[in-house]
Image (cartoon, rainbow, N blue to C red):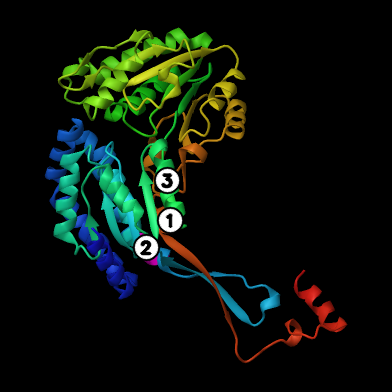
Amino acid sequence: MNNIKEKQKEFYKTGKTISYEFRLNALKRLKEAIINNEDKIYEAVYNDLNKSKGECFMTEVGLVLSDLNYQIKHLGKFMKPKKVKTPLAQFKSKSFISPHPYGNVLIISPWNYPILLSLGPLIGAIASGNTIILKPSEYSPHTSNILKEIISNTFDEKYISVILGDKTIASSLLEEKWDYIFFTGGTKVGKLVYESASKNLTPITLELGGKSPVIVDKTAKIDLACKRIIFGKFTNCGQTCVAPDYILVDDKIKDLFINSLIKWINIFYKDALTNKDYGKIINLNHYDRLISYLNDEDILYGGKSNKDSLKIEPTLVNIKNFNSPLMTNEIFGPILPIYGYKNINEIYDIIDKYKNPLALYLFTENKKIEKEILNKIQFGGGCINDTIIHLATNNLAFGGVGESGIGKYHGKYSFDTFSHDRSIVKKATWLDLPIRYAPFTNFKNKLIKIFLK
């Protein structure tokens, strides 16, 4: 492991990763490798998460290919130095911002979207001209193995390498000095990663999680709202960092709303425990954790499970106690708590209990409510009248705030994340204004004030 890292550091020093041609070629090779290995990827993700081919393309492979196409198309523009206005005080000169790679990058990715959340950051790091070590999750071993196979068959390890192993390997990697660290995972582990990075003052991106609320007011189009909420919540069996975590719905429409949710569950995931389009929980520990959350809860729908297949039905729960384990933990599974609020002002105190969610979803036709909620609540990103789709848009930055993360990526933002913007002033040599040099006479002081207005 140390040997690979040293090889990467030496390779980076050669400057080969800096050129446009090298980066573009690497992006194209990665794209070709993914296309050539699509069937292997679908099989691996299915074995890890029971994710169907259609869902895997929609939420993983398709998004990766879209990002690659975006980076390939725009790479030249991203790399081009950006001219900026130079103040009169620096006459005669020109100023520009030049993006430059950090160097040797560590990416630690999670198990829930093992292709998207590994290759998404990797694409940004490649486009920005870095060398990269990728550590995928041990909880999705089939996909981690195929990632290692694809990367090792496509790139020399001195440029990009995949390191497999458990949390002890991740800990060992974090003890090393890196030029940049990109971590996607839970808040608890994210804090440990942040602490490790701080020892070497390493710049870092943390893509974490949190309890992402859905607010449904009485003006919402109920049936459409429910259809889109069910899609966002139960895709990947609820194991999505931006999945709706709980619902706050106007009490006046709560019963109609719940009936519509049940209708759409039955349309999308009828006989969920045997439905081929419905995923499974990643492992037994997470399965047991989720089942324990249902103890003493008021289950409105679902709740059945199969330990052998690690499947849990889409489950709706009536919130009775905001201090229950169901409401004090990020759920990360197919359980959806619902609370009927009497007054819109209630929701602010509730959401404040779970500060800085990664996402927020609002269903309303009331522009005043929309503006009020967007102004009053701090969150990473989200949707109005839909769920999770902001995650799939290259032109939108994705990232959390506070407890839900630090930094952002996707599209141009991925390039920016893995690049350091160097501010440069190029001064003319044929002119040198004397006013900045001592001694500072009254005349010089007057001129300085004029220049610096």
Q: Is residue 430 visible?
A: yes
Q: Is residue 383 visible?
A: no
Q: Secondary structure at mark 3?
A: strand
State which tag comes first along the sequence, 3 or 2: 2
Q: Give the residue number, with chain letter if any, for mark 3.
A: 206
Q: CA distance from mark 3 to mark 2?
A: 18 Å
**Pointer 3 with pointer 1, Cβ within 8 A:** no
Is residue 423 shown above or below 245?
below
Q: Give the residue number, with chain letter if any, for mark 2.
A: 128
Quadrant where the image shows the N terminus: bottom left
- Please rate how many residues cluster around mark 2, counting C-alpha atoms within 10 Å: few if below 14, some from 14 to 19, many from 20: many
Q: Secondary structure at mark 1?
A: helix
Furthest toward the right, the residue is 442
Q: Position of residue 304 (x, y in %)?
A: 25, 12
Q: Residue at x 33, y 10 (%)?
A: 301
Q: Give the residue number, with chain letter if any, for mark 1.
A: 417
**Pointer 3 with pointer 2, Cβ within 8 A:** no
Closest to the observer, 64 or 320: 320
> Looking at the picture, which amino acid does disc 3 mark?
Leu
Quadrant where the image shows the C terminus: bottom right
Q: Position of residue 244 (x, y in %)?
A: 41, 26
Magenta span: 73-77
Q: CA distance from mark 3 to mark 1?
A: 11 Å
- Please rate how many residues cluster around mark 3, counting C-alpha atoms within 10 Å: few if below 14, some from 14 to 19, many from 20: many
Is residue 147 shown above or below 216?
below
Q: Position of residue 366 (x, y in %)?
A: 57, 24
Q: CA distance from mark 1 to mark 2?
A: 9 Å
Does 396 sit left or right of 316 as displayed? right
> Looking at the picture, which amino acid does disc 2 mark?
Ser
Q: Nearer the viewer, mark 3 or mark 2?
A: 3
Magenta stretch encompasses residue 75: yes
